[in-house]
Image (spheres, rainbow, N blue to C red):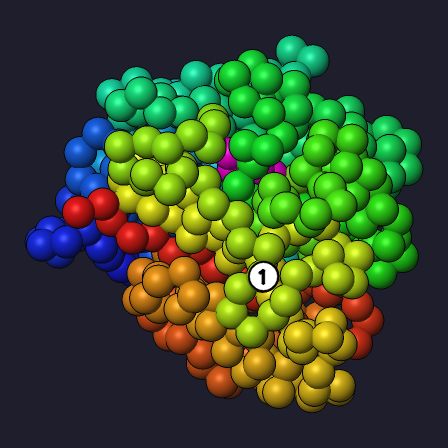
Amino acid sequence: MAISYNPIEPHAPRQARPAALRVGKNVNMMVHGVGLGAGGEIYLTARPDPGLSLTQQGREIFAGIHNLLREKRAWICQERIFAPADAMQVLAKLRADTYGDLDDGVAPTWLVGGPENTIRGVQVYAIILPHRPRLLAVHGTPCGRLIHHQGCRWITASALPIHRSGSGETQTWAAFEEAEDLLKQAGADMTSIARTWCYLNDILGWYTSFNATRSRFFAERHLLNSAQTCRLPASTGIGVRPAGDARCLIDLFAVAGEAACRYAPQGCLCKHLAAGKQRSALEYGSSFARASTVCTPAGRTVFVSGTAAIDPTGATRCLGDASGQIRMTLECLRAVLGDLECPPQKVVQAVAYCKTAEVEECFRKLAPEPRWPWLVVRGDVCRDNLLFEAEVAGMIARN
């Protein structure tokens, strides 16, 4: 197993390879940790050897995650698995058998990462605490977690909605209603959401109506107003197909309240409608912020929304030019990080969404930002003329 564990807290010694890992040599695990004790946060990206059988891929990747988190005494707070649709039932059993009591009953978000018969990768966000996060449920199904640390609260939710019948618009509305239910259980509301991830089946067929549904829900909850005050979360809306019959699946990360705290006098949660080289997405009908910054248990997290080759007027650039779109997207990501004072070396999670195999090959040849823990998946972007999209999260440790 190849492991890159990168603690990014100031003056922390580099961690040795955990001796407890007892799996094969065919999983690449990129692990970034902030804070070593209670309240420490871990971002993990794991990719198996695609030459192995699917069963072996699952066995090794889940064993590696289990052993590393157990060694760090960390609990899963959010998990996404990009794998073939017809293998997810088998992989779900392998995961449950391997994780044991690490599995708290909240299902990961299962997504189809590409046409190949291989696991594209697994992403995990985990926290080091003496007790596991409290479960939050909708309709009796656990689908969220409440994290308590030093008087502060954070909420994660995965794979909403639980009820997945009806049209894409119906499922989108249900997902946000369920999110609101979870947040209320934690003493929060929709304004507490820092980041959403929206995975849409056949995005090109209904992205306009998805946007209209999301905007209507946000307007009713006062996240949108005539003054365009930025109460919108950062977001990714991408054509990566959810498993099963879901038209959309939505994950979220929230902080309970925007009041000033001892670590962030300006507020625990700041949302940035425009940042870097791109203006507000509201100008072309999309209800999300370009980025958000959040006071999290171990420091400050910067969530950069899904970003593509769109100029300040909202027009697609570099038409038909994959390498041009990739380069422009990466420049835009770096510009947002710069605006929010997050050095590129602090990136702890990175996803590249490629429309075709040719775009993916171009991305890999460019070898962009090799220090970033890239997970590369296949999926349509929100416009047919966009070939590439990417998102990142960065963490700056608390001094």
The residue under the point 90% across, 37% down is 167
Number of marks drawn? 1
The residue under the point 50% across, 78% down is 331
* Viewer-side residue, 251 vs 240: 251
Task: Give the image quarter of residue 69.
Answer: top left
Please, is residue 7 above or below residue 373 in the view? above
Please, is residue 129 above or below residue 298 in the view? above
The residue under the point 53% across, 48% down is 271
Q: What amino acid is at disc 1? A: Ala
According to the picture, the residue beneath numbered tag 1 turns out to be 274
Q: Residues within 10 Å of mark 1 (few under 14, many from 20)?
A: some
Give percent across and percent down for residue 16: 13, 53
Task: Give the image quarter of residue 264.
Answer: top left
Quadrant into which the N terminus falls: bottom left
Q: Is residue 51 visible?
A: no
Residue 258, magenta (yes or no):
no
Q: Main secondary structure of the magenta part?
A: strand
Is residue 234 toward the left or the right of residue 4 in the image?
right
Q: Which residues are magenta?
A: 251-255
Q: Is residue 316 visible?
A: yes
Give percent across and percent down for residue 354: 65, 70
Q: Residue furthest front?
A: 227
Is residue 45 toward the left or the right of residue 36 in the image?
right
* Viewer-side residue, 362 vs 397: 397
The residue under the point 34% across, 46% down is 300
Give percent across and percent down for residue 146: 45, 22
Is residue 75 toward the left or the right of residue 188 in the image?
left
Residue 253, magenta (yes or no):
yes
